[in-house]
Amino acid sequence: MKAYLDLMQDVVDNGFDKGDRTGVGTRSVFGRQMRFNLQDGFPLVTTKKVHLRSIIYELLWFLKGSTDNTWLTERKVSIWNEWALENGDLGPIYGKQWRSWQCHDGRVIDQISEVIEQIRTKPNSRRLIVSAWNPAELPDESISPQDNVREGRMALAPCHCLFQFY
């Protein structure tokens, strides 16, 4: 928790104010990194209310490879509702990128299965990375999330663009 609070203080003291797609604005610092050894516990923010059940269901949903918000709403998780089409579609967001990354040559890569196999066979590799940042499917910020989905793009660009095992 101290690392998070230190980062927040850094943002307050050294951050730059910028506009954003929401119109609210953002204060940020560039390039900070946080690292957590999960053997020491789960790095959950405790300075604000966190809906752990929603976090767990959302992660399971990503890991299933789903991009259909219906599965979440059936479990009373509403965090994606405002960006989904009426049928629940959110376009090629996290689940698709993690489990069904489309290559230009037609291959499909299941990044989760591949990184698990790499952890087993090459645990010291520096390439134990899963990415959700697919430039070919990023949304056009000049149109609505729903219109992006209708055009085959992500409803929203990924906030968590990658994670790495080290």
Image (spheres, grey):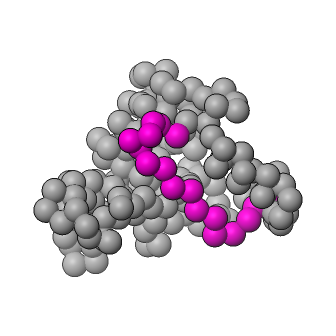
What range is drawn magenta here?
A: 25-43
> Residue shown at 72%/51% (left/top)?
6
Residue situated furthest left in the rendering? 121
| Membership of 34 in magenta stretch | yes
Q: In the rendered image, which quarter contains the C terminus?
A: bottom left
- Residue 160, image x, y percentages: 51, 55
Figure quadrant of residue 34: bottom right
| Membership of 1 in magenta stretch | no
- Residue 3, image x, y percentages: 64, 49
Q: Is residue 9 visible?
A: yes
Q: Is residue 104 left or right of residue 68?
A: left
> Residue shown at 48%/50% (left/top)?
36
Magenta region, main secondary structure: loop
88 or 35: nearer the viewer: 35
Figure quadrant of residue 60: top left
Q: Is residue 153 visible?
A: no
> Residue shown at 59%/66% (left/top)?
140
Residue situated furthest bottom in the rendering? 105
85 or 160: nearer the viewer: 160
Q: In the rendered image, which quarter contains the N terminus?
A: top right
Q: Is residue 141 left or right of residue 112?
A: right
Q: Is residue 105 left or right of residue 20?
A: left
Question: Number of marks in the image?
Answer: 0
